[in-house]
Image (tube, rainbow, N blue to C red):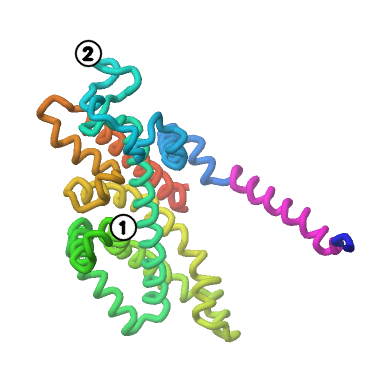
Amino acid sequence: MQPTRTSPDMAASSPRMWRRFAETGKNFFDGDVFYSFRHSPLTIVAFVITAVMFIAAVFAPWVAPYDTYDLGSLSLIDAYKPPAWSPGGDPNYLLGTDDQGRDVLSAMIFGLRISLLVGFSGVILAALLGTVMGLLSGYFGGWIDAVIMRIADVQLTFPAILIALMIDGVASTMMSSQARADFKIYVIILAIAASLWVNFARTVRGSTLVEKNKEYVQAAKVIGIHPILIMIRHVLPNVMGPVLVIATLSLAVAILTEATLSFLGVGVPPTNPSLGTLIRIGNNFLFSGEWWMSIFPGVLLVVLVLAVNLLGDWLRDALNPKLR
């Protein structure tokens, strides 16, 4: 067996690749965006809060004190215990327990995982759909633009939560009870994406109308590049700034939409609870004195949405050349 030989071109490309990577990182840390981030204490706090929540959600099985999915570890004897600092509290359950004996802190961490999963997935799907529709509408115009924009105008007349409820209801009537339980999260993701894609489409369409009349796009047309390649290689990179801003702001809307659906009882199942589900369960016991079941998940949801909104506002200002 002969040893593998590295060609001179491959050996030379590796240092060049690392140099380009280092230059890109240096340009970022010396750029206007990072400068704006560094000089905004509120944005730094929002970023730290969001990062901590994201890390806790990703590593929930290791971060949470208890596994809320392990039904064998639950005991009704431990139900309705108040927070540890209250009279009758148990030091083993820092934020108390719910009606099933689940640790509220652990349930919140696992619920945060579901809320972020649904929110991120819904926004990514909405961004993909909206960007494609916006590119097609802005670049080709004509009847394609008319059809896509009229659909968008009709959808804008309905609240996002109503669109999500309608899609969830239609999907539920088409599935069996077992299928609804198995695919409930996917249906919620689809419902959120269908209610948010319009903002992406309208913004990308406007940016595409500006970009397609510039000289570099006209030159690409003259030399015979296919329109699809022009949109992907030339137009798309120049419209990604607004898409990132809308995606950040839409993440908070997606999380709130999922929480609202779960609170209304049409979201994720109670066996796989999100923050909205935990608030709904705790709301049933709020007036009987077990306030911690809904208050703590509600506070976590408010802090998460506020932090994400602050990041979105900062990103919108940082990427706006008029404010530099």
Q: Distance between the residues labelled 2 and 1?
A: 41 Å
Seen at 49% across and 35% down, the residue is 39
- State which tag comes first along the sequence, 2 or 1: 2
Residue 87: assigned label:
2
Quarter of image, res 166: bottom left
Confirm whether residue 47 shows in the render.
Answer: no
Amino acid type assigned to the residue bearing label 1 in the image: Asp
Q: Nearer the viewer, residue 285 or 55?
A: 285
The residue positioned 24% from the left and 75% from the top of the image is: 150
Residue at the farthest front position? 72
Q: Could you say whether the residue bearing mark 1 is in a helix, strand or loop?
A: helix
Q: Name the quarter where the N terminus is drawn.
A: bottom right
Q: In the displayed structure, would residue 315 be above or below residue 143? A: above
Please name whichever residue, 17 or 321, is drawn nearer the observer in this view of the structure.
17
**What is the quadrant of residue 304 in the picture?**
top left
**What is the x, y in percent for residue 141?**
36, 80
Q: Residue 182 carries which label?
A: 1
The answer to whether residue 247 is magenta is no
Q: How crowded is mark 1: few (under 14 residues within 10 Å), some or many (20 or more)?
A: few
Residue 228: which disc? none
- Residue found at the very far top of the displayed protein: 87
Query: What residue type is disc 2 on?
Result: Pro
The rendered magenta stretch, by its main secondary structure, is classed as helix
The residue drawn where x is 56% and y is 74% is 216
Residues in magenta?
6-30
SS at mark 2?
A: loop
Judged by depth in the image, the label closer to the viewer, 2 or 1, is: 1
Q: Total number of numbered labels?
A: 2
* Coordinates of residue 45 in the picture (x, y in percent): 42, 33
Residue 58, x across and y down, in percent: 45, 42
Is any atom of residue 58 visible in this view?
yes
